Amino acid sequence: MKIGILCYPTFGGSGVLATELGMALSDKGYEVHFITYKQPVRLTLGFHPNIYFHEVKVPTYPLFDFPPYETALTSTMVDVILNQNLDLLHVHYAIPHASAAYFARQILRKKGRDIPFITTLHGTDITLVGRDATYEPVVTFSINESDAITAVSQNLKEETLREFQIEKDICVIPNFVDIKRFHQTDKRHFKQMLAPEGEKILVHVSNFRAVKRVPDVIRIFQKVHAEVPSKLLMIGDGPERQAAEDLARSLNLYHDIRFLGKQEQISEILSIADLFLLPSETESFGLSALEAMSCMVPLISSNTGGIPEINIHGKTGFLSPVGDVDDMAANAIGLLTDDAKLTLFKKNAIAHAKKFEKQHIIPLYEKLYCRVLKEHSAEKNARLLCNTKKHE
C-alpha cells in the first residue's frame, strides 16, 4: 500500500504523531510519502528506506501578502498522487489539509483518477481554530467529505460532534508512544550536572502557546521551589517563551530554571525528571505527557480535554482545575516529599503508558485503511456501473 501523509512538520503533537505513524508504517513495509513544506522534525532521527518526502514550494509574488499555501499544497498532492500512484491519503489536522485533500481529489477525478482520504483531528483544529467563523464552513464541509474521520481522544470526538454538524461517525484512535525509544535510561551524570545537590527535577514540554498556560508552570514551580529543593527544565519554544523568562526573572527563579529550547532527544531529558507539569487550558490528548509517562515520569496536570484519559488521578499523577496553581503545587509537593509514593507513581506511569504502545495502536490504523480502500473500491465500481447503464 502506498500512503500519502499530510501534516505540519513541526514539534507540535499533530506533526509528531503523523511522523511517528509514517515511520511505523514504513517499518511494516508500507510505502509512505510525506507532503509538507519542510521535512518533519522526527524524520531527522534516522533513515527509513520506505519513506519519501515531497516539499511543497510556495512561490512568492508581490500581489500576495500571504502566499496561498493551500493551493500549492493541492497542486503538489495531485502531482505526487499521479506520479507515485498513491492508494490513500491520510491528512492530519483539519486546516488546511482536509480541504486541500478534497480539492485535490476533485482535480484528480477530472483526470480519471480517484483516491480516498482520511482526516485525523488533533485538537486545536477543532477546539480553537476550527470554531472561528472564518474557517468553520470549510472545516465542516471538508471533514464531512472525508472517507473516514478519526480523533485522538474520546473527548475530542465528543467536542467535534457538539461543535460541528458532522454527518459521519468519528473513530477514536488514541495517540501512541514508542516505548523502545521513550524509556528511562541511566543519565545520572546528566542529572548530576543539572542538579548537583540532588534537587528534584520538574519538566515542561510544549510549543509555548497561550493555551499551554506557560506562566502557570513558572508559578507552580515557584511554590514547589519554596518547599522542595528543585530545578525546572523548560523544553520547547514559541510566543510565550519570553514572557515566561521575564516572569522567572521577576520571581528570582531564573537561576533554577533552564530554558532548553527545541530538543529532538527529549527522552534523555525525561529520563532524569521527577515530575511533568502540564497545566494547559485544553489538550485533546497530551502526547508529550504520554512520552513522559513512558519514561516513568508522573504528571501534574489540569483536568481538561483528553488529559484524564491518560493521567489517572491518584495513580499516574494528579488532576486539578485549569488555573488552580495552588492545588497543582500542593500535589507536586506531596509527591516530591514522599519517596515511596513517588516511586509507586513512576511505576504506575510506565504501566499505563504501555497501554498506548505503538504495537497496539498501529493495527487500528491499518484496519481502517483496509476498510476505507475496500469501501472506496466498491463505491467506484458502483459508480462505473451506473455510468455504463446511462450510456446503454
Image (cartoon, helix red, strand yellow):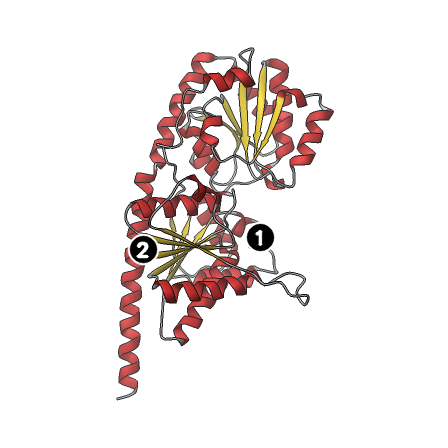
Mark yes or no: residue 152 visible. no
Where residue 126 appears, x then y in whole percent?
Answer: 52, 52
Q: Quadrant of residue 378?
A: bottom left
Residue linked to disc 2: 369
| Picture residue at 50% right of the left edge, 41% below the top | 305
In the displayed orientation, state which residue is furthest to the top.
197
Residue drawn where x is 73% and y is 25% of the image: 250
Q: Is residue 8 above or below residue 111?
A: above
Residue 379: image location, x then y, percent: 30, 69
Q: Position of residue 321 (x, y in %)?
A: 56, 32
Whether residue 260 is visible, yes or no, is yes
Could you say where residue 174 lies in the image, as x and y percent from the top left? 39, 43
Please name the residue that numbered disc 1 is placed on.
129
Q: Quadrant of the C terminus?
A: bottom left
Secondary element type, mark 2: helix
The answer to whether 40 appears left or right of 390 in the picture is: right
